[in-house]
Amino acid sequence: QKEVEQNSGPLSVPEGAIASLNCTYSDRVSQSFFWYRQYSGKSPELIMSIYSNGDKEDGRFTAQLNKASQYVSLLIRDSQPSDSATYLCAVIGGGSYIPTFGRGTSLIVHP
Amino acid sequence: DADVTQTPRNRITKTGKRIMLECSQTKGHDRMYWYRQDPGLGLQLIYYSFDVKDINKGEISDGYSVSRQAQAKFSLSLESAIPNQTALYFCATSAGDRGNQPQHFGDGTRLSIL
């Protein structure tokens, strides 16, 4: 069974700091990796996709993928209180087009 | 306007009632999905459809049925609602031309079964 693991948190960081969110996955042949942000009671919103090893940057967000170690991370620079949300990691494994979602990490950015 | 539209946004109903949740999309995506989300349990896949003639069960399909009326429409039915189906329900879509595209979610339907 494919598994995607995230620390449920909450992860608490001060405003302006770097928030680091981590995700590990069990399917070694996974090909596609996504980070979603979900505010309480709202729908998940895609913030990053990454398919190749290394870093991918988009504004204050950087996704890092290491397939050999089977982890993907999300860094949020200059964290703002508006970044407070649950961050979901999703992974599409080899031979499947259905993503497996982690349960999410709650992030709190305090002023 | 939202690309993925769910109706109704909120629904309160009684045990034993039949309920239909509707999802329509203007993204032109072939693939559509229904999820439920309970606090602390993450997203659970109920059903998914890769095209109009393709319907597949997800991990928690018991008690639910679906209909793919058109490429743009995918409905979820609870034939006889029970209280433990109280949850937040999301419809999602993804492009079908490549298999590894991200999903895009509707705003959700908050369903309460009394």
Image: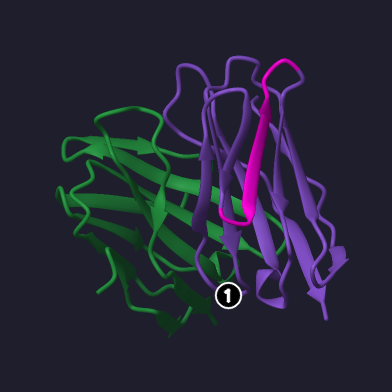
Q: Quadrant of residue A96?
A: top left
Seen from the viewer's position, the closer of residues A31 and A77 is A77
Residue that badge 1 annotates: A41
Give the left or right position of residue A23, taking residue A36 as reference.
Answer: right
The boundaries of the magenta stretch are: A59-68
- Element marked by disc 1: loop
Residue A88 locus on image (x, y percent): 63, 51
Locate the N terminus of chain B by quadrant: bottom left
Residue B3 locus on image (x, y percent): 27, 63
Chain drawn in purple:
A
Q: What residue is shown at x 41% (from left), y 30% (from top)?
A: B100
Give the answer, above or below, for where A102 lies relative to A52: below
Seen from the viewer's position, the closer of residues A80 and B48 is A80
Label 1 CA crowd tier, 10 Å (few <14, some 14–19, many 20+): few
Label 1 marks a residue whose chain is A
Chain drawn in green:
B
